Amino acid sequence: MSKSSFLSFKSITVPANGTLPVNVTGSYFNCKEGDAAFKMQVEDGEQFDFEAGLSFSWPPGTFTKLTFFNETVNPITIDFYVGNVAVHDARLNTTIDRLIIVSQKDFPTYLVGNSLALNAGDSQTFNGIDNGHQRRQIVVTNLNPAVNLTILDQFGNGVGTVFPLQAWQMPTNAPITVINQTGQPITCLVGETFYTT
């Protein structure tokens, strides 16, 4: 694109401990990417600090020269937009959307199952660790057709009730205790998924 283009994109590399003057025309500058922070100069003005993600408009009118200063021991590659219109950066929203998508992806797991026969007052604690692997989720199924099964946290507080012939599940790696607080024996199934790494 020519110097008089409405908007142009450029990529430059400023040498280590070096200076790079660039002849461009515009009234707006946006630094899209930069390997490190750097200094800039508009026309023959004062130097100022700059870095990726920053932009400026030039109120006096149109500039025709930008000078980039690298005070580090490594070359710095800088990608930027320059022209007569502002570039609005919506990458943060895009990044958040991507993070949400990535967070919905799961790491590999494996399943460990247990069958328990709990007499009145009996309990069993599952500590959330299997051979050094953290638990992802626990599922407790009450096979008794008439009475409830109780779930306690590591402090002995009730956190859930497993109704007759129903299942209770929780994504947690905290210790969980399954307790029979009734006067009848209860058989239950406990399934836990653990991360493989």
Image (tube, rainbow, N blue to C red):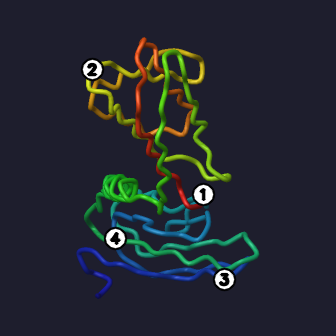
Residues at marks 1 and 3, CA–CA distance in whole angstroms: 17 Å
Residue 156's disc is: none
Q: Position of residue 147 (x, y in %)?
A: 32, 18
Q: In this view of the protein, which residue sits in the foreground, 61 or 137? A: 137
Residues at marks 4 and 1, CA–CA distance in whole angstroms: 20 Å
Q: Nearer the viewer, mark 4 or mark 3?
A: 3
| Residue at x 76%, y 75% (from the top left corner) | 73
**Image marks 4 and 2: residues in contact by CB distance under 8 Å:** no
Q: Position of residue 153 (x, y in %)?
A: 53, 23
Q: Which SS class for mark 1?
A: strand
Upstream in sequence: badge 4 or badge 2:
4
Question: Badge 3 local density, few (<14 within 10 Å), some, or many (20+)?
Answer: some
Q: In which quadrant of the rendered image does the C terminus lie?
A: bottom right
Residue 19 lies, with reference to residue 54, above or below; the image says below
Q: Which SS class for mark 3?
A: loop
- The amino acid type found where label 3 is placed reads Pro
Dot 2 corresponds to which residue?
A: 146
| Residue at x 58%, y 71% (from the top left corner) | 35
Residue 26's disc is: 4
Q: Which SS class for mark 4?
A: strand
Upstream in sequence: badge 3 or badge 2:
3
Dot 3 corresponds to which residue?
A: 15
**Image marks 4 and 3: residues in contact by CB distance under 8 Å:** no
Camera sees residue 89: no
Dot 1 corresponds to which residue?
A: 49
| Residue at x 56%, y 29% (from the top left corner) | 124
Question: Badge 1 local density, few (<14 within 10 Å), some, or many (20+)?
Answer: few
Question: Badge 2 local density, few (<14 within 10 Å), some, or many (20+)?
Answer: few
Q: Position of residue 14 (x, y in %)?
A: 61, 80
Q: In this view of the protein, which residue sits in the foreground, 12 or 109? A: 109
